[in-house]
Amino acid sequence: MNICVFCASSNPKNEMIVRQARRFAELLADNKHTLVYGGAGVGLMGLIADTILEKNGRIIGIMPEALTKREIAYKQLTERYIVGSMAERKEMMIAKSEAFVILPGGLGTLDELFEAACLASLGLCRKPIAVLNSCGYYDSLRSFLDNAVQEGLIEPSAAELLNFVSFPEEIFTALAAYKPLPAPAWVKLQN
């Protein structure tokens, strides 16, 4: 399976986040899944790619041309795609993936997470999403979603599209348990 990973291009201060990210990458490679990610060789993104390659795994990297000029592109990818913009990168990552795993990250990670979740809530992308809540990193996001449900701004079923797990070993079970929402009547489903 092609599994898209959204995560930080910087290094977290919490060593447990680093260890859990590395463990997830080991599991991904051991289970013969292909990593689809943003193509960087820095931060958690670089750590994931390094770990996958150490285990002779496959990697598809997708990077906007502007970022390649900053010399952060990972050099040893199985497949590399250079695109024109961050929006094109997201679109291609979503298209080339069968599932999404979100590790700790910043603004870019949140942007990618919400793009996948929004498409899933509309029935336009019917792929599982697992969020690795390392050390409670995403606790405030869960609280935000709970509040939005209580306010009636997000349907409870849409909030459940993000399957939060605490440990890397739980990710693949969470992905396998995914049940897509029925699409709203006005949405034409895509595969």
Image (tube, grey):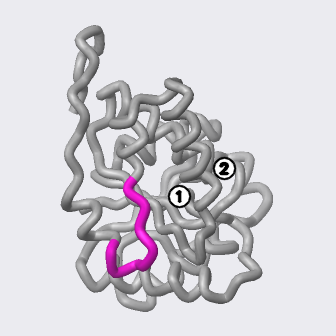
Q: Is residue 82 visible?
A: yes
Name the residue located 58 percent from the left edge and 80 percent from the top edge: 47
Camera-side residue of 46 and 147: 147
Is 107 situated above or below 10?
above
Q: Which residue lies furthest to the front in this view?
A: 150
Camera-side residue of 90 and 99: 99
Q: In this view, does 67 lie to the left or right of 51?
A: right
Question: Which of the 4 image quadrants contains residue 56?
Answer: bottom left
Quadrant in the picture for the C terminus:
top left
Q: Which residue is under mark 1?
A: 6
Q: Residue furthest top?
A: 186
Q: In this view, does 142 lie to the left or right of 70?
A: left
The magenta stretch spans residue 164: yes
Q: Where is residue 183 in the image (x, y as percent from the top left)?
A: 25, 23
Q: In this view, does 178 lie to the left or right of 118?
A: left
For the residue labelled by badge 2, is the local secondary structure a helix, a strand or a loop?
Answer: helix
The magenta stretch spans residue 118: no
Q: Where is residue 28 in the image (x, y as percent from the top left)?
A: 34, 77
Q: Do the residues under discs 1 and 2 have CB atoms within 8 angstroms?
A: yes
Type of the residue with mark 1: Phe
Q: Which residue is under mark 2?
A: 108
Is 16 situated above or below 118?
below
Type of the residue with mark 2: Gly
Q: Residue furthest right?
A: 70
Q: Which of marks 1 and 2 is nearer the N terminus?
A: 1
For the residue labelled by badge 1, is the local secondary structure a helix, a strand or a loop?
Answer: strand
Q: Is residue 32 left or right of residue 152?
A: left
Name the residue located 24 percent from the left edge and 77 percent from the top edge: 32
Residue range in magenta is 163-170
Question: Which of the 4 image quadrants contains residue 105?
Answer: bottom right
Name the residue located 40 percent from the left edge and 29 percent from the top edge: 155
